[in-house]
Amino acid sequence: SIIGGLGGAIAEYKSQFQNVPPQLTIGLPDIFGKVGNHSYLLDEYGLTGKKISERITKFFNTLS
């Protein structure tokens, strides 16, 4: 989960410093999830390797 997960803990830790790089948090949204097999759910929530890679690339391209 994005809320209360590792990304949130890292963001909280980073908040005490100045001039920290932007952070991209990837995980499950805080909603009631869908039902399905493992591969379907990974794809549905954007957690396949390809979708994570695309999201990271898009994130860094928008920083420039």
Image: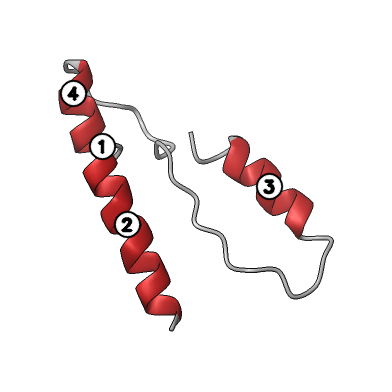
Of helix, strand and loop, which one carries label 1?
A: loop
Which mark is on residue 55?
2
Label 3 and label 4: CA atoms lie apart by: 28 Å
Query: Which type of secondary structure does the marked residue at label 4 adopt?
Result: helix
Q: CA distance from mark 3 to mark 1?
A: 22 Å
Q: Is residue 46 visible?
A: no
Q: In the image, what residue occupies the spot 24% across and 47% down?
A: 51
> Could you say whether the residue bearing mark 2 is in a helix, strand or loop?
helix
Q: Looking at the rendered structure, which numbered label has been put on residue 10?
A: 3
Name the amino acid, label 2. Answer: Arg
Q: Residue at x 84, y 60 (%)?
A: 16
Task: From the image, tell me which residue sits under label 4.
Answer: 39
Extreme-top residue of the structure: 37
Q: Residue at x 40, y 36 (%)?
A: 28
Is the residue 51 above or below the residue 39 in the image? below
Report x, y in % for residue 13. 77, 50
Left or right of residue 5, residue 32 in this image? left
Q: Amino acid at mark 1?
A: Thr
User: In terms of image quadrants, where is residue 29?
Assistant: top left
- In space, the residues marked 2 and 1 are separated at their CA atoms by 11 Å
Type of amino acid under label 3: Ile
Give the residue number, with chain letter if any, for mark 1: 48
Earlier sequence position, callout 3 versus callout 2: 3
Left or right: 35 in relation to 26: left
Vertical comparison of 50 with 20: above or below: above
Mark 3 → mark 2, Cα distance in angstroms: 19 Å
Specify few, some or many for label 1: CA neighbours under 10 Å numbering under 14, 14-19, or 20 or more: some
* Comes first in the chain, label 3 or label 1: 3
User: At numbered mark 3, what does the secondary structure look like: helix, strand or loop?
Assistant: helix
